[in-house]
Structures are given as structure tokens and as C-alpha cells.
Amino acid sequence: MAEKKWGDYLRAPLTPEKFSRSRATYLHPMRVHRDLMERLARRYHPARIACLGAGFLNDIPLEAFIQEAETLYLVDWIPGIAREGFAGSIIDSKDDNLRCLLCDDRIATGRYCAAFRPPIRAPEQVCASFEPMPGRENLCVHYAPGDQPNFLEADITLGRGGGFARRLESLVARGKTLRQVFQRALAEGKRCARIEEEMEIPADSIDLVTASMVVSQFDHEPYAFFARLLAEKFGMEKMLENEEHLRPLVEQLRSLLFQIQAEGLVREMYRIVNKTQGRVFFSVEFFRSLNGEDRYFLVHEIPRAMETIAEYFQFEFESIPAEETITTFSQNEGTSVVQCFVLTPITD
Ligand SMILES: C[S@@+](CC[C@H](N)C(=O)[O-])C[C@H]1O[C@@H](n2cnc3c(N)ncnc32)[C@H](O)[C@@H]1O
């Protein structure tokens, strides 16, 4: 049975298999992103970093970020996902030795792992507590989260995506026809544009904000939940029967959801970034092709999101030259053309 509550939908189990699948699919293609973000971190030495939509951290250059930053926020609305990604990222192998990224003289090790016990053993570069987990060698049995990073379970869109999804539960339950539910959902979406729930990150505090590969999901998640609730209430057959004449309402709703969330994210990035020296790394999927086809489609609504960004930020092409900002990557479903931007806040 489909989850009827948004919280349960988000909380779908984070199994070790899910993590391994995500790593196997995304770690390699995300290398360009990690390299670009690492370059930014090594050049500007940000003391405070916030990764919005951190997920399993496939695209986060964790070693560079923990070496450079005193404070690191990993924010995602899926409970536990960034914690799982972090635990699965700290052990890697170097010259056939397993080493722990947290056991490094350049970082305040004890702040990152409550189980840290000196000395750091050479050449493995692990601490006295280190013990690989049987069957999952890239995990340490004793890793225990310390003060850092800050795993923040929050909506990065000013609460709008989650706020809309939570209202759907009763809205769908009370609806009599599909058309009526769509119309009420549209009205609700417009109301959600006024939600202003800020993340627990102080204003002007962050030297490097990252929002990588997040925006293109905005018309997907809350809508996918909505579609599940509808299928459960009205039945798949009825949904398919009505597909054609509901299409304009579907498009209107997805577009509205995208816009209110994109605006919420841009405003949150602007609120938290340090206005004198802060930067944002932002990446977005602009074009997509379906597997086996050589035609590329513009990803819905992205130009609108770029206009919203331009109201709050300037585009900087010095730290990442323009010719290096476009990357492509292929997955089972097709190929994506992704553009990365470095943004600086407009202050006048
Ligand atoms: C495609 S992933 C980005 C890649 C991710 N850094 C990784 O390596 O797995 C997008 C992440 O953004 C999160 N996300 C999407 N919308 C969000 C929202 N409104 N608030 C918080 N997190 C969100 C998703 O849960 C997902 O983990």
C-alpha cells in the first residue's frame, strides 16, 4: 500500500542496498561536480559550508570540505540520508590500506567522530578505535557522529515543498472527483507560496553554499506523492482514462510547484550566504535526452529558475571558467546536460 503520509513517504527505508546502488550509479558521473566544488573550497577556504539537498553525498568533496570548514551543514529532508552518506564516505582505501578521512591532522578529529581515540596509526591513517564493519569494509563499526557535521533534517525551499505535500493528505481524502482535487491542489499550491519556514542556519553566516542537482527534482517529489495518493483513492484505471483532459491541470500544478520551491530555495541560499565574501555553487540539469534518442529536451521550467537566481545573485565565471561549467552524464534512462554556476550575492 502507498504511504498516506508525506513523512512516511520521505522516510522510506534507507537500506544499505539503496546506498550502494546510489553510489554505484552516481559516484563516478559526479566526479566533475566534486572536483569543481573542491577547487572552490581550496581557493576560498570557506570556514562555514552548507550543502543543501546533500542526499548520500555522491557529489560532495567531503575530504576537502571537512579539512577547510570549521562548520559543515548537510541538509536534506529525507531523515538520516546525509548521516548514512557521511558514514559511508569517511573510509576509503589508499595504497591498499583502509584510511579514515576524519583521522587527519588537518581537522579537529574529535569534533567529527565521538569515538575517536588517539593515536592515529600510520600508514593506515586510522585511529585506535578503527575497526572495519564485516561485510561493509567502507564503514567503521565505531564511528559515532560528533558535533560536526550538522545533519539538518529540513526543507530547503522555505518549507514550501513539504508544506504543500502535507496538506495533500486531507485534500485528497475529501475530494470527490479528480478534477476537483486538482483545482483544490492548485489553490493550495498558491497559498503555499506564502510559507516562509527558514532552515536553522543563521542569516549571512555561510561562506560556501552548495545546491547541486536539486532544483530539477522540484516538480517531481511532492507531485509524485500527490499522484500516489490519487491512484490510491481513485484507482489507476480512472487516472489513465482522465489523463488527456487533466493534462493542462497537471502541467499547471507541476509548474506552480516548481516555481514556489525554486523561489524558496533561491531566497534561502541568499539569506544564509555571507554577503561580503560568500559564494554559492549551483548546478542544474538543463537538457535531457531519452535513452537511444539523440534529441534533447529542455528541462521544464529551468529558464524561469535562472531568472529568479539573477534577481538575487551575480554569475561569476572566474573561479570556474565558462568552458568548464557544462558537463554531461549518462544513466540508464538517458543523458543529462548539466551546467554548474558560481554565484555571488547582489548587495546593492
Ligand atoms: C539528486 S539529489 C542531489 C545529489 C545528492 N547531493 C547526492 O549526492 O545524493 C537531491 C537531494 O535533494 C533532496 N531534496 C529535494 N528537495 C528537497 C527539499 N525541498 N528540501 C530538502 N531536501 C530536498 C533530495 O531528498 C535528494 O537527497
Image: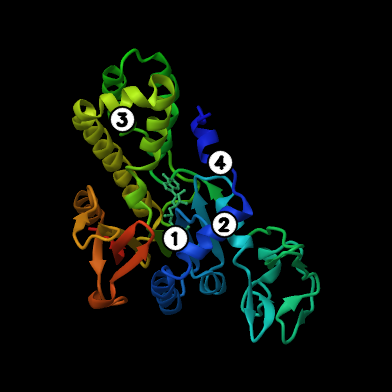
Please tell me whether residue 119 is drawn above or below residue 255 in the rendered image: below
Question: Disc 2 versus disc 3: distance between alpha carbons?
Answer: 32 Å
- Mark 2 against mark 3, which lies toward the viewer? 2
Q: Of marks 4 and 1, which one's residue comes earlier in the chain? A: 4
Q: Nearer the viewer, mark 1 or mark 2?
A: 2
Which amino acid, by three-letter code, is at mark 4? Ala
Q: Mark 2 sits on what residue?
A: 19
For residue 132, say whether it is visible.
Answer: yes
Q: Which residue matches tag 1?
A: 206
| Residue type beneath disc 3 | Gly
Residue pointed to by mark 3: 189
- Disc 4 is placed on an element classified as loop
**Residue 26 location, x and y as percent?**
46, 64
Q: CA distance from mark 4 to mark 1?
A: 31 Å
Residue found 45% across the figure and 53% down from its top: 53
Packing grade of label 1 (10 A; few <14, some 14-19, many >=20) is many
Where in the figure is residue 114, as x and y percent of width and height?
Answer: 74, 61
Rendering quarter of residue 173:
top left
Q: Secondary structure at mark 3?
A: helix
- In the rendered structure, find residue 12 and report the number of the disc placed on it: 4
Tag nearer the camera, 1 or 3: 3
